[in-house]
Amino acid sequence: MKAKTTKLCKDCNFCKRAYKRIWCEYYTKKRYLCTLGDRLTLRENSCDNWQKKELDYDLSQKRFDDIEKDIRRLLDRLSKI
């Protein structure tokens, strides 16, 4: 996988996607919230504080135990049908 070299707000660790509510649906219009500057921005922008987005995964044993418990509960309910 090729590393991202473009400095866009969508690739910044400090920018979060902004959502807008219309009727009962949520959608985005390529707007992001800069958590450092506390302002809305477009995905094509970047600033001096740009930092490459880092993905964080929760692979703890507790999470796997919870998933296993949920699957057992689903199987139990499906067997009653």
Image: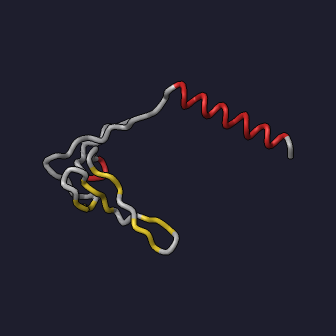
Residue at (49, 29) in percent of width and height: 59
> Which of the 4 image quarters holds residue 18?
bottom left
Furthest-left residue in view? 48
Residue at (34, 62) in percent of width and height: 30
74 lies left or right of 44:
right
Residue at (79, 42) in percent of width and height: 77
Residue 76 x/y as whole percent: 79, 37
43 lies left or right of 78:
left
Residue 12 x/y as whole percent: 27, 47
Furthest-top residue in view? 61
Furthest-right residue in view? 81
> Which of the 4 image quarters holds residue 61?
top right
**Near-viewer residue (39 or 13):** 39
Q: In which quarter of the image is the N terminus?
A: top left
67 lies left or right of 16:
right
Residue 32 x/y as whole percent: 30, 58
**Near-viewer residue (37 or 5):** 37
Residue 11 x/y as whole percent: 30, 47
**Near-viewer residue (33 or 47):** 33
Residue at (26, 61) in percent of width and height: 42
